[in-house]
Image: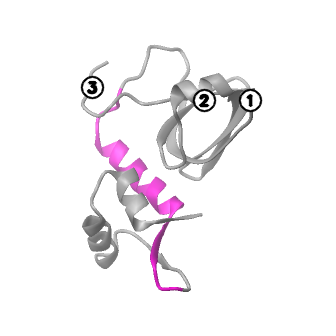
Amino acid sequence: MNVRIGEAAEMLGVSVDTIRRWERDHQLKTVRTAGGQRQVPLAEVTRLLNERRRAQPERSTTAQSARNRFMGVVTHVDRDRVAAVVEIQAGPHRLVSLMTREALDELDLKVGDEAACVVKATNVIVERPAPRGSRE
């Protein structure tokens, strides 16, 4: 899956010019559409998010015992009146969570959002990270 460079810039919290510079400096791979538009593979966005996450101190969410946390990017959201399915690409891992529609609405997740999957036993719990700079 590919995203437009503006979407990639938003996901990474940088400008479109930065995306173009990273491409020029071979720090980011892009592909061209048949019409010549630049797009960024979602795997590249995930790779850069992971690199940036490793370079920064861990952001806290809430206290819990689960230790299998995977930061990633929401790649698909499917909802009906009662249930929802959320897919997250976390590095090479594709994680899928089935949750209530109400839980999805509370999380306000959309394709392209950063999210954490917490895996405990056979359940996948999806959290929203605290805003950058937050100490909570």
Q: Which residue is mark 2?
A: 104
Q: Are marks 2 and 3 in contact (CB under 8 Å)?
A: no
Q: Magenta residues, as a range? A: 35-59
- The circle drawn on residue 60 is none
Choose the circle earlier in sequence order: 2 or 3: 2
Quadrant of residue 20 in the image?
bottom left
Where does the image place residue 12, in percent across and percent down from the top left?
A: 36, 53
Q: Secondary structure at mark 2?
A: helix
Total count of labels: 3
The kind of residue on which mark 3 rests is Ser
Q: Which residue is mark 1?
A: 83
The kind of residue on which mark 2 rests is Leu
Q: Which residue is mark 3?
A: 134
Residue 123 located within the stretch drawn in magenta: no
The kind of residue on which mark 1 rests is Ala
Choose the circle earlier in sequence order: 1 or 2: 1
Choose the circle earlier in sequence order: 1 or 3: 1
Q: Are marks 1 and 3 in contact (CB under 8 Å)?
A: no
Instruction: Left or right? Give the position of 55 relative to 37.
Output: left
* Up/down of 63 relative to 49, above or below: above
